[in-house]
Image (spheres, rainbow, N blue to C red):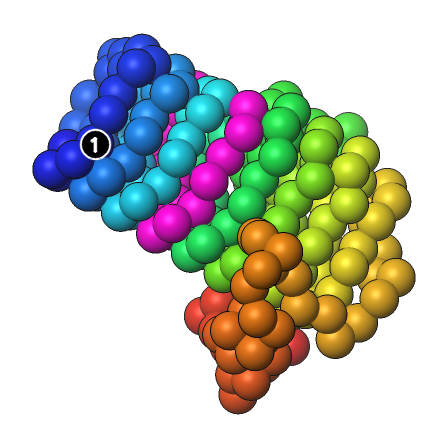
Amino acid sequence: MRNGGHVSGRIVIEGERNILRVGKNVVLNATLWLQGSGTIVEIEDNCIIEGMIRVVRGEGGRIRIGEGTTFGAVGISLHEAGEINIGKDCLFSTDIHMDVSDMHPIYDGTTRERINPAKSVQIGDHVWLGQRVLLLKGATIGSGTVVGANSTVVGDLPNNVIAVGSPARVVRENIVWARNFDEPFVEQALPTSGASGGWRQRLGLGKR
């Protein structure tokens, strides 16, 4: 853990070859429980984290929380190997949950092949999640987007939109949000609205 941080939660590491990297000025008031092996958890500078980060099983999972992101009570789980990538300056409310897995396998009765593999979760920069948002495996949220309370994200949401519902659907496009009422519009708009290349490119996902 780098300079200026504060840990008031609980850190339990039970697996093997796990790596925890915590940046400068991080407030970690959370339970961090690593049961898997070969997992990397990275919390970048100036984050405030509350809730639980839990890696239950799997080999080679990764969780990254970008610089300046703040959590209320958030549950992040890796029930299988996969990646949860959270961008910079995100704002998450309370009772939010995300996982890369359905937590139990489902098989085709004829072929006996598994039909519900794990899928990674990708969240862009400056994303605001309201209370009780659920992100299922494979969820992708573009930068600058707001997801309303009690919503479930099951697929892709573009950048700079408001999405609500279960499953979450876009109800407003071309929006910009700020953390504080006295912040000027342009300062918040530049990182996302003015960027070129599209939201999938900014997340490193390529074109679809």
Q: 15 or 173: which is nearer to us?
A: 173
Q: Which residues are magenta?
A: 54-74
Q: Is residue 200 left or right of residue 41?
A: right
Percent from the top left, x then y, of residue 18? 22, 29
What residue is shown at x 23% (from left), y 39% (from top)?
Answer: 25
Q: State the residue lying farthest toward the left.
A: 3
What residue is shown at x 77% (from left), y 59% (from top)?
Answer: 162
Give the number of callouts. 1
In the rendered image of this protein, does residue 62 appear above or below residue 103?
Answer: below
Percent from the top left, x then y, of residue 199? 58, 74
Q: 13 or 189: which is nearer to us?
A: 189
In the rendered image of this protein, does residue 165 appear above or below residue 103?
Answer: below
Residue at label 1?
5
Q: Quadrant of the N terminus?
A: top left
Percent from the top left, x then y, of residue 122? 53, 54
- Type of residue at label 1? Gly
Q: Is residue 46 left or right of residue 135?
A: left
Q: Is residue 154 left or right of residue 84?
A: right
- Any magenta on residue 59? yes
**Can see residue 70?**
yes
What residue is shown at x 66% (from left), y 68% (from top)?
Answer: 176
What secondary structure is found at the residue carrying circle 1?
loop
Q: State the residue lying farthest toward the front.
A: 182
Q: Is residue 60 left or right of residue 143?
A: left
